Amino acid sequence: MENGVFVGGGGDGYGVKQWLRLDFANRHGLVAGATGTGKTVTLQILAEGFSAQGVPVFMSDVKGDLSGLAKPGSAEFKLHQPFTDRAQTIGFDDFAYRAFPVTFWDLFGDQGHPIRTTVAEMGPLLISRLLELSEAQEGILNIAFRVADEEGLPLLDLKDLQSMLVWLGENKDTVSLRYGNIAVQSVGAIQRRLLVLENQGAADFFGEPALDLRDLMRVDADGQGQINILAADKLMASPRLYATFLLWLLSELFEELPEVGDPDKPKLVFFFDEAHLLFDGAPKALVDKVEQVARLIRSKGVGVYFITQNPDDIPEDILGQLGNRVQHALRAFTARDRKALRMAAETYRENPAFDTEQAIREVGVGEAVTSMLERKGIPGVVERTLIRPPSSQLGPISPAERGGVIGTSDLGTKYKNRLDRQSAYEILAQRTKDAAVAAAAAETKEVDLDVAMREYTAGRRYTGARVGRSTSQPARTRSSRNSESIGEAIANVVVKELKGTTGRRIVRGILGGLFKAR
């Protein structure tokens, strides 16, 4: 089948070839199974098949084994003979060892080209998920993004976001009048979460140059799709960062890529390993976003394949959109396991040749129960399939070989050096500096005014002789003042006596004598 990916052989004796049709590869898929049942090899052969058909692939390497895609397998390998026998059994006639074009990526920049994005591109919803914020704290984070946008403060790295939160705390009274209450305690809680994230190495993830999505969708000179491998062995120590990053990447693909309808083959196939980490404790808003992306990104030409141990890890609304399925063995040790096994079997189109539930329980390593979409997107009948052997090396390559692949990549110079252009941190720092300079200048001016005022007051006080209250009376000597005081005292006594009884008698006597004389 020219327009398909060869998965393996099914039917009686495993002689019926099982294909994943490229024109339905963007209808998404599921690879599930317990630990040690062969999921990693299935991922490897799917990546090989897509790359050979000119379809770029993005996948995370949780255990480091997928780096072997960059190196051809060897006849000296211990499984060479079993691989050859399996290829003959399933009719893989053109089986040969070969390498595939690989680009290594790493959020920390140690085992691949660094991947970066800006805080603004990540957005408040995903950062709140990353920091495990409460509803009130998420509200404050939304305010920070809104104010930064209005004030022209680019949020590029963690320093920018931290500075923006400090500014909110200092101006909470003003901002709260417009956007609602901003509690200093909540701002402090967000800052502490950012510090933890920074200590985990996420500071390297936020910044510039940001990842150009076109660098994930390249095809080499031979028409082979580039296989992009994210080193996730260290990243898994921070599972929330891992899940948030992959969800961000999906969201960016959804927002940036144009509509293409149903193409003959996908523009990119995205493998989401350890998918349960995306949904563990996820709020409904986030699950709804994943469902929206999974439902609509198909028309952008992107196929999304979730890899997990149990299909029960995927929400039902999303699980129903995964048309192409490879189900490795499930172990039913508990009642919950048996229930999950039964539910997984019920999602397949039945094959009268065998019991699906029993088959899922019994398939061995390298074998799986598969169902691929057929014409008009109808799910195919479930088959017990022997997965084809990989053409590339099974297992990881050496650090020196990885370094050689990274060193020869033309993307090295593009992403190696970190950029630090002017953003919120620098702008707010300059504003603080300018405010401090203005305050110092105002204080100096006030001191100068105080000195001038004191000099002016002192000048008024000491110019000319000191003058008391003016009077028209000449100055008198002390003896005259004393004489006047004695005379005034005698006159007061006389007036008092005249006003009394004796005084009235005297006056009457005098007046009576005068009238008689007349």
Image (tube, rainbow, N blue to C red):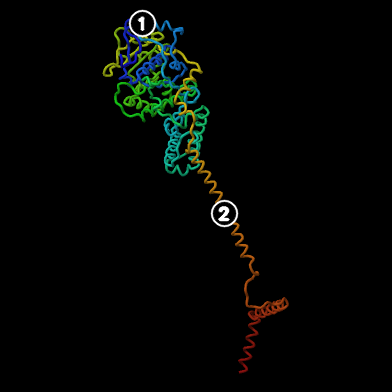
Amino acid bearing label 2? Glu
Q: Secondary structure at mark 1?
A: helix
Residue at horizontal 62 percent and vertical 94 percent from the top: 517
Q: Which mark is residue 177?
A: none
Residue 21: image location, x then y, percent = 31, 17
Q: Residues within 10 Å of mark 1 (few under 14, many from 20)?
A: some
Q: Which mark is residue 89?
A: 1
Task: Please state which of the two labelled residues, at mark 1 or mark 2, is closer to the viewer.
Answer: 1
Residue position marked by numbered label 2 in the rendering = 446
174 with respect to 356 (left or right): right
* Rendered view: 193 above or below 76: below
Could you say which is closer to the camera, residue 9 or residue 68? 68
Residue 399: image location, x then y, percent = 51, 18
Q: Residue furthest front?
A: 221
Q: Secondary structure at mark 2?
A: helix
Residue 115: image location, x then y, percent = 45, 27
Location of residue 27 by image quarter: top left
Q: Residues within 10 Å of mark 2 (few under 14, many from 20)?
A: few
Could you say which is closer to the camera, residue 68 or residue 326? 68
Whole-angstrom CA distance, mark 1 to mark 2, is 94 Å
